[in-house]
Amino acid sequence: MLLAFDVGNTNIVLGVFKGKKLIESWRMETDKNKSADEYGMLINQFFTYSNLNIADVKDVIISTVVPSISYTLQHLSIKYFNIRAIEVGPGIKTGMVIKYDNPKQVGADRIVNAVAAYNKYGGPLIIIDFGTCTTFCCISDKCEYLGGTIAPGIKISSDALFEKTAKLPRVELIEPGHAICRNTNESMQSGLVYGHMGVVDFIVRKIKQEYVEMKGGSPEDITVVATGGLATMVSKGVDAINHVDRLLTLEGLQMIYEKNKNNFGNRTSCSKENKESIELRAQND
């Protein structure tokens, strides 16, 4: 089995694959202060609850936008699975041409999403990931990562309203059902949710316009895929979204694993020095 880690700023999403099939997934809070052993115990509990045997994991792949967590997860992988995990980053084969000015600046999760979406839906396409930030990525019909947009996520906006005002409360992120609201909670929910829908609608329309000017074709040719925890709620108010695919990143990790599993030599035998080095870096970070 393959264990895949999608590490975001707020949550870590884990997935277990048997061959190409995702058989289980879980979500837990991203905590820079947790040790490899603490994460290991949580993962062991997840496996036990789902009647899976942790000893069946034969390989590990990690995508992270939190660099300090990667050392911890590498230590976990070596200690609990006796293998050095594959990390999505420079040197990894993706099959995608990155047109960013500096390809190293593109978040690993954005590349993983792009690989998965292109393989599943073809191109051209726009991928929207509703995470801590809301990211928009544009992929050409020739599997080129052209770039995109990064906007504050709904939760960031909600936290800012609560923290930067004296009287506004923290509210649940749900759709209130109307925009003419008669209490503060629903007024905030309306602004946060419907305001974000408006942002998504405008940016998608803008990206489509620029893509057509750059590559030709029609805006209707561009498929829009949404992923992330709040994708389902936001997509209800955005007609431009064609597909909601909440586990897109995990599927992308499995695809990238297949492209790279034979290109990293023998990762199953980790020397004592290598283990100690990774453990020390995990503790220091």
Image (cartoon, rainbow, N blue to C red):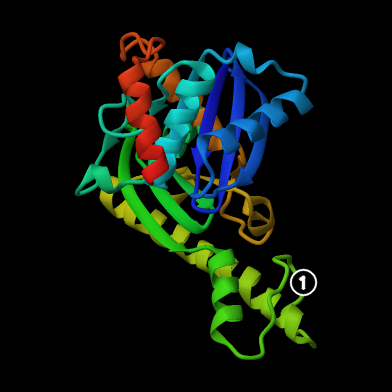
**How many marks overall?**
1
Q: Front-most of 1 and 229?
A: 1
Could you tell me which quadrant the N terminus lies in? top right
Measured along the vertical axis of the image, is residue 93 above or below residue 90? above
- Name the secondary structure under disc 1: loop
Residue at the left extreme of this rendering: 101
Pick the residue in front: 40 or 244: 40
Please state which of residues 202 and 77 is positioned toward the viewer in this rendering.
77
Tell whether 190 sits left or right of 141.
right
| The one of 151 and 12 positioned closer to us in this rendering | 12
Residue at the spot x=44%, y=63% of the render?
A: 151
Q: Quadrant of residue 275?
A: top left
Residue 116: x and y in percent read 48, 31
In-image side of 274 versus 166 (left or right) = left
Residue 115 location, quadrant: top left
Left or right: residue 213 versus residue 25 is left
The answer to whether any part of residue 124 appears in the image is no
Q: Position of residue 282 (x, y in %)?
A: 40, 39
Q: How dense is the environment of label 1, judged by Cα within 10 Å: few (below 14), some, or many (20 and up)?
A: some
Q: Point out residue 20 in the picture as x, y percentages from the top left corner.
A: 57, 16
Q: Residue at x 56, y 42 (%)?
A: 12
Amino acid at pointer 1: Pro
> Where 190 falls versus 60 (above or below)?
below
69 left or right of 170?
left
Q: Residue at x 32, y 22 (%)?
A: 274
Q: Does residue 225 sit above or below 272 in this rendering?
A: below
What residue is pinned by disc 1?
A: 176
Q: Position of residue 272 (x, y in %)?
A: 35, 17
Q: Name the residue at the bottom extreme.
A: 166
Q: Is residue 233 visible?
A: yes
